[in-house]
Image (cartoon, rainbow, N blue to C red):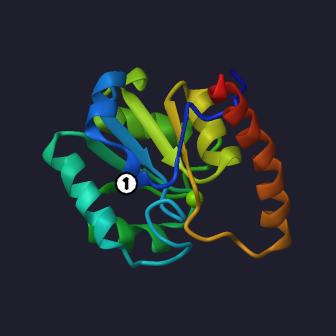
Amino acid sequence: MSLFTPNLMLNNVTDIDLDFLESKGIKGIILDVDNTLTMHNSQEVHKIVLEWLQKMKDNSIKLIIVSNNYEERIKPFADKIGLDYISFGCKPLTKGMTQAVKKMGLKKEQVAIVGDQIYTDILGGNLKGLYTILVVPFELENTTFFKIKRRLEKLHINKYNRINRK
Ligand SMILES: [Mg+2]
């Protein structure tokens, strides 16, 4: 499978359920922040996301944030939802993810990464050998750069859909 193809695509992080994690032997999840847990640069958290986080914690699923965004943006958010975090994670480079897997005390085969971007979250996760989950971003960015990137990502998403239709 291509490094740009996620193992799974979901609408929302909250669609990840415990039975699924158990079936894959996943005991920890690396979480992206912007457009995965909340809107870009927002400190707000939806009730449904908070409830999902709590359910994971209650069932001993380890959670950690790895974001490419800066400390000043990520720390208050991580504190608010009570999670450990790695900021300036440099995804798709695997360094931040390696640290995260180590912090969770798990093997990489037991870890999933969830994020909204193919070229950072999914590519990085696949390079690291994690189970990769792509979610639909909360909001689509308006800049030209993001528009081009989203269009490129669509190619990979179409490929995923083709593979999984069979
Ligand atoms: Mg993101």
Q: Relative to 21, does residue 50 appear above or below in the rendering?
A: below
How many other residues sit within 10 Å of disc 1, few (<14), some (14-19) or many (≥20)? some
- Front residue of this view, candidates 89 and 15: 15
43 and 48: which is toward the camera: 48
Q: The disc labelled 1 sits on which kind of residue? A: Thr
Residue shown at 77% from the left, 48% from the top: 154
Q: Residue 35: horizontal and vertical position, in percent?
A: 54, 64
The residue positioned 51% from the left and 56% from the top of the image is 67
- Displayed-image quarter of ligand 1: bottom right
Left or right of residue 61, residue 154 in this image = right
Whether 163 is drawn above or below 94: the answer is above
Q: Residue lying at the far left in this picture: please name it.
A: 58
User: In screen coordinates, is 127 left or right of 80?
Assistant: right
Which residue is located at x 30 percent, y 37 percent?
104
Q: Secondary structure at mark 1?
A: helix
Residue wearing tag 1: 14
Q: Quadrant of the N terminus?
A: top right
Q: Do we see residue 82 in this rendering?
A: no
Q: Residue furthest front?
A: 166
